[in-house]
Image: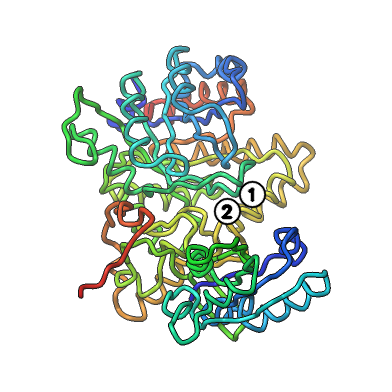
Amino acid sequence: MTFREKVLKGKFVITAEVAPPRGTDWKPVVEPLKPLKGKVDAFNVTDCQRSMVRMAPLPMAKLLKDSGYDPILQLTCRDRNRIALQSELLGAYALGVENVCLMTGDFTTLGDQPDAKPVFDLDSVQLIELASQLNSGKLLNGKELKGKVNFFIGAVYNPFAGPEILQAWKLEKKIKAGARFIQTQPIYDVKLAEEVSSFIYSLGAVPIIGLLPIKSLKMANFMKKLNPTSVPDSLVKGLETAKDPASYGWEFVLNIARACLEFSGGIHFMLVGKVRELADFIDYLKKHRDYSVKF
Amino acid sequence: MVTVKLKPLEEIVDSLSGFEKIFIVGCQLGSARCRNGGLREAYRVAGYLELKGFKVVGVKSPGGTCVLDRLDYSARSLLNEIKETADVVLSLACGAGTQLIAENVPIPVKTGVTTLFIGAEREGRYFEEYCIACGDCVISDTGGICPVARCPKSLVNGPCGGAIAGKCEVDPNLPCIWFKIAQRMEQIGELEKLRKRVPPKDYSLSVYPRKLVLEE
């Protein structure tokens, strides 16, 4: 079953993130994923994340697909106007890339090419509307497409951003515009993951909870700096006292992953560091008598 | 107002090298208001240039430098005065004023400022960008606060996911304007309006150079 089929059938999905290379060497990016083949349902291919120049996400998504993985093409509004976004999406579909995750994107000055001109012609809601419009057979200007597309559209949600009411409405707008699955920023709290999941379900989309294993206290502090309320004190304390903080952080996240099976539509690993361990964990879940039915 | 920033004096000196008779033009609108290019600053620059051996033949401000009538009214034409006395103009007016001078004198015109933004002033010291002249004003729907100018991403459908603890992801010293918009919309009983999807902006309206022509 493809990622799309699984989501639509209400099966629990597991996605992970792949960053294209900062150059042309794509094989070292794809090869380590081998243990995850057939286990992770789809791989998000990031679009120059943190505004750092990398290989474009579409060719990387195509290379992944050719290597036997189901890609989710991430597209942001940072570097492309509505003409480029439409043409990129049409090209994606022609190459067999059907899953997309659409977002506004990090700002240019946060990356390593801060002198670039920021575009932001559309915002995430409008980009999702654009993809839905393509799905209906028309370009944004209303002209008919030659050849149809049928994108499976996703979006993102950060439960730690504010103002709360406007973030909620923006998520609602994204889902009304056509987002079918929502991948969240990393969540380290089961109760919050459950609340977020039920909120996303209530709006009519499938939640996929973001998980980012924390490898060290340093990384926890970095995450805290980005998102102060996202890292619970219990996690920080645990990392402080753990003999092996990396294992502690990994187990912490796996516990959340297990909990998500009870109430969410899927989980999204935002870092594929421990490929072997992740593959083993997925095997364990799929064989577990309580969880296997979810897949 | 249009705000400007005076260039470093050394840079101004460099741009004038080779010239002898300098006419300095300030502007009493935005440049003076933000104290970077009014008459006062023009005199200060003049003093510095004279120390550096230049001859300053005139220091004047026509009021609004970007208004041709002010530069060139028949009784006392600043343009004529410049032509008769100087071999270069140093303008501290904004980009518009400086170009208008350049279009109307036969000698080179150098700028002593960089034009920054259309902004608002507080306490005579704080100037903030409030408008990017997008040509498609939305502020009636956003509580009179412009997200196009005051959000670096010009988002019109609400804040991005980088709006953490009220701060903008682009600059931690910058509050996310959507917090202010939400507060204001609640205050005036219009919060619910922000729930409506906003279509893409028409950027053809901001294709420059733009014109405004008044009917006769």
Q: Which residue is mark 1?
A: A223
Alpha-carbon span between mark 2 and mark 1? 8 Å
Across and down, in percent, residue A181 comes to 35, 39
- Give the amino acid type for the residue marked by disc 2 in the picture: Ser
Looking at the image, residue B46 lies above or below residue B196? below
Left or right? Give the position of B97 relative to A221.
Answer: left
Q: Is residue B32 above or below residue A188?
A: below
Q: Identify the element where label 1 is drawn.
A: helix
Check disc 2 and report the residue beneath it: A230
In this rendered view, identify the residue nearer to me: B133 or A127. B133
Residue at 60% from the left image edge and 48% from the top image edge:
A110
Callout 2–callout 1 Cβ contact below 8 Å: yes
Residue occupying image coordinates x 45% and y 46%: A119
Residue at horizontal 50 percent and vertical 85 percent from the top = B76
Q: How far from the left and from the top, in percent, is residue B161?
A: 48, 53
> Which residue type does callout 1 highlight?
Met
